[in-house]
Structure formats: structure tokens, C-alpha cells
């Protein structure tokens, strides 16, 4: 024979069987709120996309009209501004702070003043040049931003192609 309290526990256990399940409704409510928040906060993020013109692997270089064929060759110790037909136009050796991207941008402003109709340029890199350097050089080739007027900029060569530097 079992005691009275054991019988009472047994009856209560049978009465409340299946009622000890996890309530997932508050968790679903929180997930809906989080998804709503993420969707509407993603609208306010700014992403900028820069289109690059990569040369095809088997495509030949098209015949360009006579004139400037601008190439910016980035090497470990120097940035060379070259014309594909004439050779090196200007060499910008590294400064103690790194690559002379500011000097490159100022020189390209002079080149743009002589060849105003040109829109394209090639940036050629040695294999060990960092991605950060590539981005800074591409920005210097695309636009010129004067130091004293940080809000204004002048378009230089917006159609940038990227490739490997000649050895």
C-alpha cells in the first residue's frame, strides 16, 4: 500500500501530463522582430560598386587611335606612368610613408589637361603589391581631389583596367 501523499503526487502527475512543453511563441515573436529590424536597417547601408574592365584571356588588344595609351605600372619601389608606345613618362619613387599616390594624382591631372578626350587607363601590378595599394592607385587614376578643397574632385580616367605588370 502506498501513502496518501504518493497517491496525490501520482494523480497530479497524471492530470498535468503533457503540459510541461516549451512555449516557442515568444521566441517566434522575437525572431519576427529581429528579421523586420535587419531588413529595414539594411536599406540604410551604403555600398559602392566600381566597374572594372578586365581584359579577356584570349582577346587581342584592339587597335587604338594614335595618341596616349596610358598605363600606370605599380612596382615594389616605384610607380611608373607610361605610354604603351613611347615608354616611361614619369617615375614616382616611394616616399618614407609609402607609395606617392598624391604625386601620381597630380601628374595625371597634367596628363588629363593635354589629353582631355581620353577616358581609359590601365593599372598594372607586380604580384606582391597589396590590395590596399591597388585601391589607392585606382582612386588616384579615376579622380583628382585637391588637398585644400576636399569636397571637390576632378574626373581623370574613369575607365580603369587592371592587369599584371610586365617583367
Image (spheres, rainbow, N blue to C red):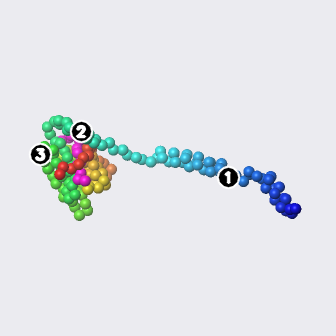
The answer to whether residue 117 is magenta is: yes
Q: Is residue 101 visible?
A: yes
Specify the label residue 38 is tagged with: none
State how far apart marks 2 and 1 are (Cα).
62 Å
Give the labeled residue for mark 1: 22
Residue in view at x 16 percent, y 48 percent = 82
Say which label, 3 or 1, has the lower sequence index.
1
Secondary structure under the numbered disc 3 in the rendered image: loop
Secondary structure under the numbered disc 2 in the rendered image: loop
Please tell me whether mark 3 or mark 2 is closer to you in this view: 2
Q: Nearer the viewer, residue 104 or 164?
A: 164
State how far apart marks 3 and 2 are (Cα).
25 Å
Residue 111: image location, x then y, percent: 18, 46
Specify the label residue 58 is tagged with: 2
Q: Are marks 2 and 1 in contact (CB under 8 Å)?
A: no
Specify the label residue 86 is tagged with: 3
Please tell me whether mark 3 or mark 1 is closer to you in this view: 1
Amino acid at each position: 500500500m502506498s501513502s496518501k501523499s504518493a497517491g496525490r503526487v501520482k494523480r497530479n502527475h497524471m492530470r498535468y501530463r503533457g503540459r510541461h512543453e516549451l512555449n516557442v511563441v515568444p521566441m517566434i515573436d522575437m525572431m519576427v522582430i529581429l528579421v523586420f529590424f535587419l531588413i529595414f536597417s539594411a536599406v540604410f547601408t551604403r555600398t559602392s560598386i566600381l566597374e572594372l574592365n578586365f581584359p579577356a584571356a584570349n582577346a587581342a588588344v584592339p587597335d587604338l587611335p594614335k595618341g596616349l595609351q596610358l598605363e600606370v605600372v605599380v612596382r615594389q619601389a616605384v610607380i611608373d606612368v607610361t605610354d604603351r608606345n613611347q615608354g616611361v613618362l614619369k617615375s614616382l619613387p616611394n616616399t618614407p610613408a609609402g607609395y606617392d599616390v598624391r604625386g601620381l594624382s597630380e601628374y595625371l591631372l597634367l596628363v588629363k589637361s593635354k589629353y582631355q578626350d581620353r577616358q581609359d587607363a590601365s593599372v598594372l601590378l607586380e604580384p606582391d603589391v597589396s590590395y590596399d595599394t591597388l585601391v589607392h592607385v585606382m582612386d588616384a587614376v579615376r579622380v583628382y581631389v585637391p588637398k585644400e578643397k576636399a569636397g571637390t574632385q576632378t574626373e581623370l580616367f574613369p575607365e580603369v583596367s587592371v592587369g599584371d605588370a610586365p617583367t
